[in-house]
Image (cartoon, rainbow, N blue to C red):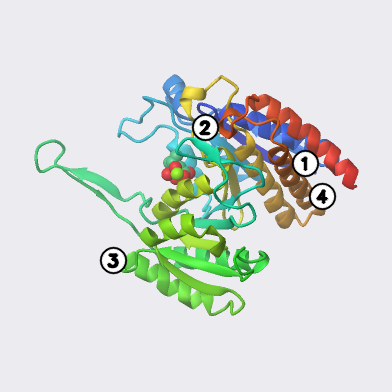
Amino acid sequence: MALKVVALPGDGIGPEVVREGIKVLKAVEETYGLEFDIVPYPCGGKHYMETGEEWPDGAFESCRSADAILLGAIGYPGANLPNGDLAGAGVVFGLRFGLDLYANVRPTKLYPNVKHSIHGVPKQVWEPGKVDFVIVRENTEGAYTPIRGSLRRGGVEELAVDDSVITRKGAERVVRFSFELASKRTGAPLDGLKRVTCVDKSNVLQGCRLFRFVYDQVAEEYPGVERDYAYVDAFMQWMIRKPEAYDVVVTSNLFGDIATDLAAVLQGGMGLAAGGNVGDRHAMFEPVHGSAPKYEGQDVANPLATVLAVQMMLEWLGERKKKRSLTEASRVVEAAVGAILREGKILTQDLGGKAKCSQVGDVLAERVGSMAKSEG
Ligand code: IPM
Ligand code: MG
C-alpha cells in the first residue's frame, strides 16, 4: 500500500530543497519497490500575501491523515498577519501543536571532510566522529505556549508578556522519548557511554525546576543511561568546546531553538541540519534552516538538510510500519549523503563548492540507486 506523504514546500528556497528531497524519495521508491503518494500543498507567507490564507482549507486534515509530512520552510519578507505574527508560522505551529508533535529531534553529526566556516575561513576544527549527538527539543510548550499579549499599546508604559509553561506531562513525555533514544544509540563519542543531558535554567526558573525534577524521576527507569545536567548558558560553551561528551540532550522549547542553530555550526552549517517533529502518532520532517529568500529561485541552496530530513522520515516510517525496506532505504540515503560529502566534488556554495541544488539532488538520487544495488 502506498504511503501518503504530504509535501509543504512553503517559502523562499523551500520549494527548491523539497523538490530535491522528493527526487531522493522517488529513487527510494524505484530501488526498494516502495510506493509514496506525495500530496503537495502550497503554504507560507507568500501564499498568504497572494490568497489571504497561510495554507488551503483541508491541508491540515490531509496532514493528519498522512503517514508523514515533509516541510520546506516558511517566512517571507513583509508577510505578516494582522496581529504582527509571521505569516506561515500557523502552518508550523498548526502541525506541532495540532498533531501534538512533542519531540523536535535535531541530530548534530559531523560527516568526514566537511569544513566549517569560522572567521569565514573553512577548515576542520572538530574531528568527524567526535560530533555525533542529538538535541531533543520540547516542541509544544515552554516559551512557545500561545499565552501572550500586549497591554497599553504605545506610550511609555507599553508592556508585552509571554508566558512560559512547563507541565509535568509535557516534560515527562519528551524526557522519556530522550531516554528511549539514548537506549538505542551507541553512546557519546568520548567514552561510549549512553547519556542524556538535561539542559535547563533551573537555578533561576521554576518551570525548569519542574523539568529537571521530572527528568530525575524518568531517569530512574533507565539505569543503563547516564544522567548529566547543564545550565543552558554553560551548555552553550561546553557543546562547542567538548561536543564529544554529548549523546542525547533534552531541553525546553526556546533553549532548544537557540541551541540547535549553534549546534549546526559543529556539523558544517544550517545546510546540513535536519529535524523531525515527532509525536506518538504523527511526524513532520524539515530542514532546520529557514526560507532564505535572498537565495530563492537561484538553485544554489544546499538540499542536503532536506535529504537528511527525508532520511529521518524513512527511519521513523520504518520503525512505525515495521518495514525493513524503509529502514534499509534510510541507511542508504545517509550513506549516499556521507559519500558525496567525503568525495567533496559536488557541493553547493555554502560548503565551498559550485554545484547547483538540483545537481546535488540528481547525484544523490543516482547514488541511492547504485549503492543499494551494489549492496543488495
Ligand atoms: C525552528 C524555527 C521556528 C521556531 C520558526 C520558523 C517559527 O526557528 O524550527 O527552529 O522558532 O521554532
Ligand atoms: Mg529555530
How far apart are the two marked residues, 3 and 2, measured between alpha carbons? 43 Å
Residue 343 position by quadrant: top right
| Coordinates of residue 192 in the picture (x, y in percent) | 64, 69
Which residue extends farthest left? 156
Q: Secondary structure at mark 3?
A: loop
Q: Amino acid at mark 3?
A: Val
Q: Which residue is mark 1?
A: 2
Q: Are marks 2 and 4 in contact (CB under 8 Å)?
A: no
Of the two numbered discs 2 and 4 on the same chain, state the one appearing first in sequence. Answer: 2
How far apart are the two marked residues, 1 and 4, measured between alpha carbons? 14 Å
Q: Secondary structure at mark 1?
A: loop
Q: Which residue is mark 3?
A: 204
Of the two numbered discs 1 and 4 on the same chain, state the one appearing first in sequence. Answer: 1
Of the two numbered discs 4 and 3 on the same chain, state the one appearing first in sequence. Answer: 3
Give the residue drawn at x 38%, y 34%. Answer: 86
| Coordinates of residue 178 in the picture (x, y in percent) | 56, 64
Numbered label attached to residue 171: none
Of the two numbered discs 3 and 2 on the same chain, state the one appearing first in sequence. Answer: 2
Image-based side of 360 in relation to 27, left or right: left
Give the residue drawn at x 49%, y 62%. Answer: 250
Numbered label attached to residue 325: 4
| Coordinates of residue 206 in the picture (x, y in percent) | 31, 67
Q: Is residue 116 above or below residue 277?
A: above
Q: Are marks 1 and 4 in contact (CB under 8 Å)?
A: no
Q: Amino acid at mark 2?
A: Asp
Q: Nearer the viewer, mark 3 or mark 2?
A: 3
How far apart are the two marked residues, 3 and 1, measured between alpha carbons? 50 Å
Q: Secondary structure at mark 4?
A: helix
Residue nearer the viewer, 64 or 71 = 71
How far apart are the two marked residues, 2 and 4, measured between alpha carbons? 34 Å
